[in-house]
Amino acid sequence: MEPIMLNLDTKAWSSFRIKDLFEVSLADGDIKEKECELGNIPLVSSGETNNGIVTYTNGICAKPSTIIAGNKITVDMFGNAYFQPDDFYCVSHGRVNILTPRNPLTTNQFLFICSLIKLEKYRFSYGRALYSNGIKELTLKLPTVENGSPDWKGIDEYMQSVFPFIPSTQNSSKNHKINIKNWHNFQISSLFNLENGKVSQAGTLEIGNDLFYLGAKKDNNGLMGKCIRIDKMVSKGNCLVFICDGQGSVGYVNYMDQEFMGTVNLTLGYNPNLNPYTGLFIATVASLERPRYSYGRKWRGNVGSTRIKLPAIKKANGDYEPDWQFMENYIKSLPYGDCI
């Protein structure tokens, strides 16, 4: 979430140091993304995207670390600040500061503080990183009440006016963890009709406003731009987009809801049960396979043989089928799920 300080008169606000509002700490151990087994617990590192989450793990890693209870803020060395509502692991080599509130905060209040910290990002860089001592002394201006304390109620009311879909009285996140013990392994080729993107040379495209062009790009859902429609290069929407090539991008999976033109480095998966909710659920699960691939070990050609674990229903003949309704309901139950 980008800073949201809109239409606020801050002249009468008071200054507070981070250490007056939060306890600041670092994670123990030194776990790394590529040294951990996959699971459903976030692993947070430095970064500007995905709430700082680089993968999901079960906590079984080459080096041990302690799981961190949710309802914290993580701030990396460049000033990227994120609210972590659920329990998580955190790398220590990435110098990610963990902020534990001295008094309980609501989701709105956490997000407000994150936005204020992000406004300070311009001050930090590789040559001037934000370490623990710096974050402790970092000063933020907050609205106050008569006794000089932060006006937490006013912050809640303001955030509710900006983001009315965020629960205003939430003190801890709803527990959205999933028990995957009864999930079943499915081969991707058994779930989807697979085909490749149809654009072999991007130079044949002309910039326009007809359709999105998708490429081997991990950010922004793989969108490279908008182009003039070329019918023979158009792929249908409502599909999963598996990125099979590209340094730093191979292994990411996105959901695309509308027609587009995509590079041949993409494999597209179609199933009549896909919709924005089931698509996002499976894209998230399939993206957990990303650590297995790299620029030197491409995903192209073996997407179909990849196996992923999904919630399943056992049929009368003993076979399993994905529980599409569970996946849809789960995504709808998440914060902001009703905004998809």
Image (spheres, rainbow, N blue to C red):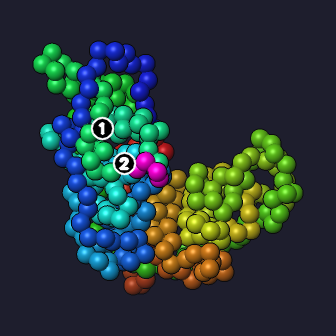
Q: Residue at 78% of width from left, 44% of height from top?
A: 210
Seen in the image, is 294 located left or right of residue 126?
right
Q: Earlier in the sequence, mark 1 or mark 2?
A: 2
- Residue kind at label 2, given as amino acid type: Leu
Question: The N terminus lies in which quarter of the figure?
Answer: top left
Q: Residue at 59% of width from left, 65% of height from top?
A: 249
Q: Mark 2 and mark 1 in contact (Cβ < 8 Å)?
A: yes
Please tell me in which quadrant of the rendered image residue 115 appears. Answer: top left
Q: Tell me if mark 1 has few (under 14), some (14-19) or many (20+) residues whose alpha carbon lies within 10 angstroms of its own.
A: some
- Residue kind at label 1, given as amino acid type: Leu
User: At which x and y percent is residue 242?
Assistant: 60, 67
Which segment did they paint magenta? 126-130
Asked if residue 33 can be seen in this view, the reply is yes
Question: Residue at label 2?
Answer: 130
Seen in the image, is 196 located left or right of residue 63?
right
Q: Secondary structure at mark 2?
A: loop
User: At which x and y percent is residue 222?
Assistant: 63, 56
Q: Tell me if mark 2 has few (under 14), some (14-19) or many (20+) residues whose alpha carbon lies within 10 angstroms of its own.
A: many
**Does 254 appear above or below 138?**
below
Q: Main secondary structure of the magenta part?
A: loop
Question: Residue at label 1?
Answer: 138
Q: Nearer the viewer, residue 177 or 3?
A: 3
Q: Residue at 41% of width from left, 36% of height from top?
A: 120
Q: Nearer the viewer, residue 115 or 251?
A: 115
Seen in the image, is 163 located left or right of residue 70?
right
Magenta span includes 204: no
* Residue, far left: 147
Q: Nearer the viewer, residue 27 or 313?
A: 27
Please tell me in which quadrant of the rendered image residue 38 appears. Answer: bottom left
For the image, the number of numbered tags is 2
User: At which x and y percent is residue 126?
Assistant: 47, 53
